[in-house]
Amino acid sequence: DAKTTQPPSMDCAEGRAANLPCNHSTISGNEYVYWYRQIHSQGPQYIIHGLKNNETNEMASLIITEDRKSSTLILPHATLRDTAVYYCIVRVRDDKIIFGKGTRLHILP
Amino acid sequence: DTAVSQTPKYLVTQMGNDKSIKCEQNLGHDTMYWYKQDSKKFLKIMFSYNNKELIINETVPNRFSPKSPDKAHLNLHINSLELGDSAVYFCASSFRGRYEQYFGPGTRLTVT
C-alpha cells in the first residue's frame, strides 16, 4: 500500500504556481520522497526527489517539512502541458515504487 | 532517439491466446521493470530485472513470464490470456542505486 496521502484533484490557473501537497506521516529516516507525474496516455515521468533538504531542478521544487511528515511539490509557472496525475511516493533507494492514487492536476487557461 | 521503447503499442487478442510484449532501452541502464496499469488507473509493479537476474517478482500469475536476453531488453510473455489481463503495460529502466526510473510509452492490451 502507498504510504502517502494526496488530494484527489486540484485546479491551478495557467501561469500561476501549482502547489501539490503530500502527507507521509509514517516516513522512515532512510526513505526518500519522490514525485512522478503521468500525462494522459503516457508513461510516468520522474520529476524530483529529496530526503530532508529542499530540492529544485528545471521542472519543479520540492519543499519537505522539518519533521519530514509532509512535503509540497511546486511547479513555479504552470502551463497547460502540466495537466497530469502527480504521484508522491516514499521509498528506500533501490526499493520498488508503489504508486498511490495521486493528485489529478488541472491547469485552467 | 526513444529512450525506452515498447512494441506493440496496441494489442487486441482473444481469450486463451499467448502473446508477447517487447521492451528495449538505450540508456545503458542495468535494471528494467514491468508495470501494469488497470482500468482504474492503479499502477503496480510486476517484475524487475537487474543484469538479467530477477530481483522483484510481485504476486503475479505464473501465466506471466518475463525474459531478459540482455541488459537492454526485457520481454513479457503472457500465456492463456484472460479478460482481466486487459490493461496498459509499462516497461521502465534505471540504474540500480539511482533514484529515477524512465518509463516507456506503454502497451495497451485488450483481451476479448
Image: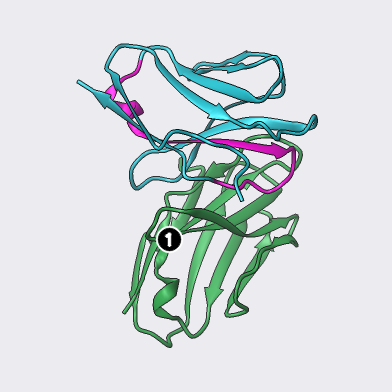
Say which chain is green: B
The vertical placement of A9 against B20, above or below, is above
- Report which quarter residue A30 is drawn in: top right
Report the chain holding disc 1: B
**Residue placed most toward the observer, B33 or A79:** A79
Q: Amino acid at mark 1?
A: Asp
Q: Residue furthest front?
A: A25
Q: Residue at x 40, y 37 (%)?
A: A8
Q: Residue at x 35, y 27 (%)?
A: A82
Q: Residue furthest right?
A: A29
Q: Mark 1, residues whose alpha carbon is within 10 Å: few (<14), some, or many (≥20)?
A: some
The residue where tag 1 is placed is B38
Q: Residue at x 37, y 60 (%)?
A: B39
Residue A88 lies in the magenta stretch:
yes
Say which chain is cyan: A
**Residue placed most toward the observer, B67 or B16:** B16
Range covered by the magenta-colored residues: A78-99
Task: Look at the numbered disc 1 and give the secondary structure of its residue.
Answer: loop
- Number of numbered labels in the structure image: 1
The quadrant of the rendering that contains the C terminus of chain A is: top left
Q: Residue furthest bottom?
A: B16
The vertical placement of A32 against B30, above or below, is above
Task: Give the left or right position of residue A81, taking residue A20 as reference.
Answer: left
| Residue B22 spot, x, y in % from top left | 51, 63
| Residue A104 spot, x, y in % from top left | 37, 36
Task: Give the left or right position of residue B46, taking residue A102 as reference.
Answer: right
The vertical placement of B17 against A43, above or below, is below
Q: Residue furthest left?
A: A109
| Residue A7 spot, x, y in % from top left | 43, 33
Task: Give the left or right position of residue B65, taking residue A7 as reference.
Answer: right
